[in-house]
Image (cartoon, rainbow, N blue to C red):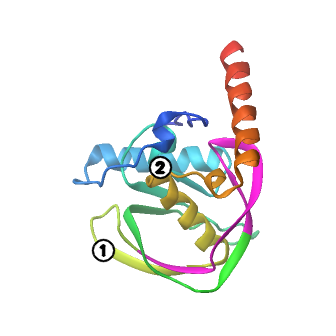
Amino acid sequence: MALRDILIHPDPRLKTPAKPVETIDDGLRTLAQDMLQTMYAAPGIGLAAPQVGQLVRMLVMDCVKEEGVPPRPMILINPRITWSSDALSTYEEGCLSIPEQYADVERPAEVEVAWTTIEGTEASERFDGLWSTCVQHEIDHLDGKLFIDYLKPLKRQMITRKMVKLKRERARA
């Protein structure tokens, strides 16, 4: 397992829709484990393959934050939302590709998601709370969408300018 570099916005790969996974092989399994390790190290609760420069429809997440509760790492391949609640919830979202920037985003409060597991079996689950927000945020990444795309243009431009400056500073370091 290895830590992967997380792309920082603006990067064209973050705006490119990911391709469906056709084959689950050792390369994909390695990518999934690397993504989990990278997510935990960041630290974060979710990470989509495009964020590490791999344009395939896979995400990892683990929203367990309670002390003493065992982690619940999840790997979702070709995830798709099959149902959304009419009820909405607002959550202050952040993103590993947009460090230290946060904004309120309104999304369906609950979603049902179907996906293929890393073992190749079909799975589905209904998510609510932080899990619901996280899985929708990560599926957006697979569609080339960022949480700042939900914001008003001025706020989005302000955050983008901060990220351009951050990338310049990191390139100099």
Name the residue nearer the viewer: 157 or 121.
157
Residue 23 appears in the rendering:
yes
Name the residue nearer the viewer: 153 or 31.
153
* Image location (x, y in percent) of residue 47: 54, 52
Q: Nearer the viewer, mark 2 or mark 1?
A: 2
Question: What residue is rendered at 38% in x and 43% in y?
Answer: 55
The disc, 2 or 1, on the residue closer to the chain's N-terminal end is 1
> Mark 2: few, some, or many residues within 10 Å (few <14, many ≥20)?
some
Question: What residue is rendered at 42% in x and 63% in y?
Answer: 76
- Is 139 drawn above or below residue 98 in the view shown? below
* Image location (x, y in percent) of residue 169: 73, 20
The amino acid marked with disc number 1 is Glu
Q: Which residue is mark 2?
A: 144
Res. 65 image quadrant: bottom right
The amino acid marked with disc number 2 is Gly
Left or right: 88 with respect to 15? right
Q: Main secondary structure of the magenta part?
A: strand
Q: CA distance from mark 2 to mark 1?
A: 24 Å
* Furthest-front residue in this view: 153
Res. 5 image quadrant: top right
Q: Which residues are magenta?
A: 91-113
Name the mark on residue 122. 1
- Is 88 drawn above or below residue 103 in the view shown? below
